[in-house]
Amino acid sequence: MKQTEYKVDGRTLCVLLESEIDHHHVKDIIDEIRRKGNMNFSKNIVFDFSKVNFMDSSAIGLMMEAYKRTSCVGGNVLVKNISRRGYRAFQMAGILKFISVEDSNSD
């Protein structure tokens, strides 16, 4: 079962993604980000990809949804520990103009 952990640190929502990121899972993540973000007035979102072993194009949609949410309140999206393949997918999609990446891992 896919388990995603959410933690609030001040006005930052930290999302530890697990296993696979696909269109079924992304819908649940977006719903939870909206719920937790509204409850805690989150400004920034940090996604940790360290436990992700597969992602499809819906991960790009997830990042764009997070960007839309944070940009309207002057916040940012940060991606940590993404694989080299994931980084390249984000790069090819052009979303690195909107999000920040740190600690990229190699495959």
Image: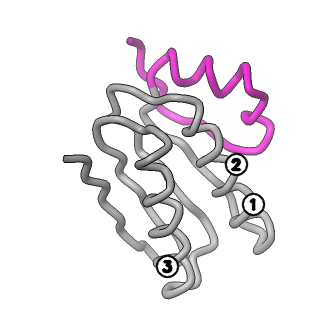
Question: Alpha-carbon neighbours of circle 3 within 10 Å: few (<14), some, or many (≥20)?
Answer: few
Q: Are marks 2 and 1 in contact (CB under 8 Å)?
A: yes
Question: Alpha-carbon neighbours of circle 2 within 10 Å: few (<14), some, or many (≥20)?
Answer: some
On screen, residue 72 versus residue 40, left or right, reads: right
Secondary structure under the numbered disc 3 in the rendered image: helix
- First in sequence: mark 2 vs mark 3: 3
Secondary structure under the numbered disc 1 in the rendered image: helix
Query: Which quadrant holds the C terminus?
Result: top left
Residue indicated by mark 2: 64
Residue indicated by mark 3: 35
Q: Magenta residues, as a range?
A: 83-107
Callout 1, which amino acid?
Answer: Lys
Q: Position of residue 102 (x, y in %)?
A: 53, 35
- Residue depicted at 50% across the width and 16% down the height: 84
- Residue depicted at 70% across the width and 48% down the height: 64
Q: Are marks 3 and 1 in contact (CB under 8 Å)?
A: no
Callout 3, which amino acid?
Answer: Arg
Check the image and report above or below for 1 versus 45. above
Outermost residue toward the bottom in this view: 39
Q: Position of residue 69 (x, y in %)?
A: 70, 66
Taking depth in this image into account, of 1 and 17 the one nearest to the observer is 1
Image disc number at residue 68: 1
On screen, residue 66 versus residue 39, left or right, reads: right
Q: CA distance from mark 2 to mark 1?
A: 6 Å
